[in-house]
Image (tube, rainbow, N blue to C red):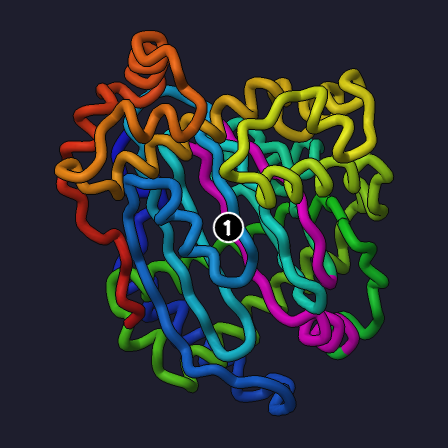
């Protein structure tokens, strides 16, 4: 698969048309002058390291575990406008992500490609044309297949509430988590304006960075989001009692990253049976807790190898630091997962993947 996202081509003529339409609609838009108005910024970046990819999510804590074999690549477009943050993302390999959105912030997430295989969000299948909404903070797991593409719009929760009252004329009373199916016309409008903004970010960022253009796109995007929510079929609008188990599971893994964890110890620490943990992991992660721990640990080793000085550290030292004592079996498993030997990763000179915002 080509590294570039499979977006529909966006010509300068189409983008100019969209910009003109957005600016024209903005002249009579509502005034949301209260609150924070950050200077607009955009960033477009490709990654070969999932740890670097995680850092690109600036509005939530993001952890990625790659669940498939092969060479990893990812591409993201981030558009930070005055009051909203828009993202588009593509990853070459199947992955499981854990995202923790802070209290007071909301996010609307949706698949980009109408033909792509569905993704799982918080243990629920989200199909093209559907949206997954986290309102006023929360955490969840998302898993996507090879080549999965998704987009998001995030904002302060009070900003979303204000737009819903002023644009839709009512408060939709979103639950902590809301899964909806929007009308085809409403979703098409959201996808189109999101694509238009991304096209400008990639090919003419200076236009999108103009405060008046950024503010106009913000209004158009939020109107489309509210339109999608106001006329949507609600598929889920409550927080499952199962979710705290997965939160405690992830909190334990984050707190004990340097310790080798065993399933009985994990279950004892978070207060669940092994059977219950296995069922929740299959639902939310698509794999057993043992497999998830193994993948996390293998990726931790890869990260350690990729940033280590080959003149000061050896593969043996790094592997044993993470509990891999049988080095032959470790090397075979490592090459099967990543397509190269541990020594190749250690010896490679790596540069920074960081992108300077425009």
Figure quadrant of the N terminus: top left
Q: Decide: is 79 above or below 302.
A: below
Residue 333 lies, in percent from the top left, at: 36, 13
| Image coordinates for residue 249, horizontal then vertical, percent | 69, 36
Mark 1 nearby-residue class (10 Å; few <14, some 14–19, many ≥20):
many
Residue 24, image x, y percentages: 48, 81
Which image quadrant for residue 80?
bottom left
Front one among 138 and 42: 138
The picture places residue 341, in percent across and down from the top left corner, at 22, 19
21 left or right, relative to 61: left
Q: Residue 50 sits in which quadrant?
A: top left
Residue assigned mark 1: 151
Q: Can residue 177 be seen in the rendering of this structure?
A: yes
Q: Residue at x 37, y 56 (%)?
A: 77
Query: For this rendering, which residue is in front, 342 or 124?
Result: 342
Residue located at (43% from left, 86% from top): 212
């Amino acid at each position: 698969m080509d590294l570039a996202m499979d977006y529909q081509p966006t010509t300068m003529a189409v983008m100019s048309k969209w910009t003109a339409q957005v600016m024209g609609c903005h002249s009579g838009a509502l005034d949301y002058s209260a609150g924070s108005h950050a200077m607009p910024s955009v960033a477009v970046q490709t990654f070969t390291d999932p740890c670097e990819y995680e850092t690109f999510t600036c509005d939530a804590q993001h952890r990625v575990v790659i669940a498939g074999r092969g060479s990893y690549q990812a591409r993201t477009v981030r558009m930070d406008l005055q009051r909203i943050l828009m993202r588009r993302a593509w990853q070459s390999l199947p992955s499981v992500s854990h995202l923790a959105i802070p209290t007071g912030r909301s996010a609307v997430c949706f698949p980009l490609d109408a033909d792509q295989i569905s993704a799982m969000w918080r243990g629920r299948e989200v199909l093209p044309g559907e949206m997954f909404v986290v309102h006023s903070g929360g955490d969840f797991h998302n898993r996507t297949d090879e080549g999965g593409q998704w987009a998001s719009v995030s904002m302060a929760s009070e900003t979303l509430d204000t737009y819903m009252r002023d644009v839709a004329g009512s408060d939709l009373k979103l639950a902590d988590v809301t899964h909806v199916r929007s009308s085809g016309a409403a979703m098409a409008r959201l996808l189109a304006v999101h694509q238009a903004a991304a096209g400008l970010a990639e090919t003419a960022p200076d236009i999108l960075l103009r405060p008046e253009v950024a503010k106009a796109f913000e209004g158009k995007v939020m109107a489309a989001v509210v339109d999608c929510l106001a006329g949507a079929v609600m598929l889920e609008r409550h927080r499952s009692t199962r979710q705290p188990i997965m939160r405690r599971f992830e909190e334990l893994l984050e707190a004990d990253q340097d310790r080798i964890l065993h399933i009985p110890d994990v279950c004892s620490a978070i207060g669940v049976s092994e059977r219950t943990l296995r069922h929740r992991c299959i639902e939310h992660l698509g794999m057993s807790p043992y497999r998830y721990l193994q993948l996390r640990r293998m990726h931790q080793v890869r990260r350690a190898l990729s940033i280590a000085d080959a003149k000061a550290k050896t593969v043996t030292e790094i592997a044993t630091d993470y509990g891999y004592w049988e080095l032959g079996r470790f090397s075979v498993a490592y090459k099967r997962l990543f397509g190269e030997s541990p020594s190749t990763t250690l010896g490679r000179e790596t540069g920074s993947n960081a992108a300077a915002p425009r």
